[in-house]
Image (cartoon, rainbow, N blue to C red):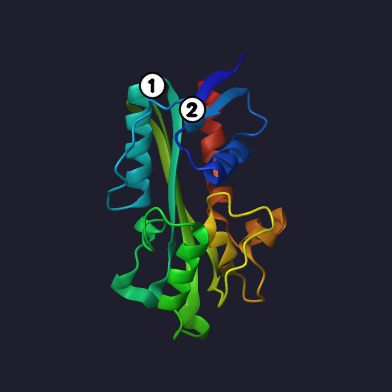
């Protein structure tokens, strides 16, 4: 039987991404849906790495088990101090539908064109057990643009609304990229795959 590992998230899209990173390893995975007692962690810190570490430490301490946590966000340089990747989800309002989040961001960017719509993604992953940090990494990538409209996949956003806004230079949406496309564009998740899998494999 593989090592038991908890994914420190209640976001279905993030849980699916973490499961994909760990696919094929001898691990028993569960996520926040199975642990209503898991703590709500204030996502405050100077970096995505710091936030991921804080989540991993808090969840692993509370649950007494091995935990993987992540944190990521979208950088849009043209918005300056009016936007921070650290609050990507909350930056356009708490407790509103993903479609409304997208509409609010598009309104803020309505006068921006060309390279002023450039953006990229940052992702960080941390592993902890019983409150002790075992490893943490951060990566940037997926340089692209914010489209002028919001087009989510037919299956819905599943908690990842940015995918309906982010496009390549040729206008391909994030959700329409192939696995080869994401590697070519420097998907941060792909960069985090090897170190995360290496550490979890050793722990097993």
Reading the image, the residue beneath label 1 is: 63
Q: Residues within 10 Å of mark 1 (few under 14, many from 20)?
A: some
Tag count: 2
**Left or right of 18: which side holds 100?**
left
Front residue of 55 and 203? 55
Q: What is the quadrant of residue 20 in the picture?
A: top right
Q: CA distance from mark 1 to mark 2?
A: 9 Å
Of the pair 194 and 14, the residue shown nearer to us: 14
Q: Which x, y percent locates residue 75?
A: 42, 65
Is residue 173 visible in the rendered image? The answer is yes
Q: Are marks 1 and 2 in contact (CB under 8 Å)?
A: yes
Residue 60 image-quadrant placement: top left
Residue 3: % across, % down: 54, 19
- Disc 2 secondary structure class: strand
Could you tell me which secondary element the residue under label 1 belongs to? helix
Q: Which mark is residue 186?
A: none
Q: Is residue 130 visible?
A: no
Disc sitting over residue 6 in the figure = 2
Identity of the residue furthest to the top in this view: 1
Image coordinates of residue 157 in percent, x first then y, are 58, 54
Considering the image in quadrants, where does the C terminus appear?
Answer: top right
Residue 5 placed where, x, y %? Answer: 51, 25
Establish if 67 lies above or below 140: above
**151 on left or right of 44:** right
Q: Is residue 135 above or below residue 149?
A: above
Residue at image coords 63%, 28%:
25
Crowd class of label 2 (few under 14; some 14 to 19; many from 20; radius 10 Å) = many
Label 1 or label 2, whichever comes before in sequence order: 2
Q: Is residue 94 above or below residue 103?
A: above
Q: Is residue 95 above or below residue 106?
A: above
User: In percent of the image, x 65 and y 74: which residue is there?
Assistant: 171
Point out the image quarter for the N terminus: top right
């Amino acid at each position: 039987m593989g090592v038991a590992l908890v994914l420190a998230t209640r976001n279905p899209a993030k849980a699916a991404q973490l499961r994909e990173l760990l696919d094929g390893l001898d691990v028993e995975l569960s996520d926040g849906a199975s642990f209503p007692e898991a703590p709500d962690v204030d996502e405050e810190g100077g970096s995505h790495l710091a936030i991921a570490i804080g989540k991993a430490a808090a969840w692993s301490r509370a649950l007494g088990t091995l935990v993987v946590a992540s944190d990521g966000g979208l950088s849009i340089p043209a918005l300056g101090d009016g936007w921070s990747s650290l609050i990507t989800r909350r930056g356009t309002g708490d407790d509103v539908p993903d479609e409304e989040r997208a509409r609010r961001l598009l309104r803020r960017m309505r006068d921006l064109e060309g390279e002023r719509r450039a953006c990229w993604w940052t992702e960080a992953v941390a592993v902890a057990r019983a409150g002790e940090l075992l490893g943490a990494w951060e990566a940037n990538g997926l340089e692209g643009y914010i489209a002028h409209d919001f087009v989510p996949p037919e299956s819905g956003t599943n908690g990842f609304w940015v995918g309906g806004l982010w496009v390549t230079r040729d206008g391909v949406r994030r959700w329409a990229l192939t696995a080869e496309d994401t590697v070519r564009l420097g998907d941060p998740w792909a960069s985090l795959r090897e170190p995360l899998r290496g550490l979890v494999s050793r722990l097993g």
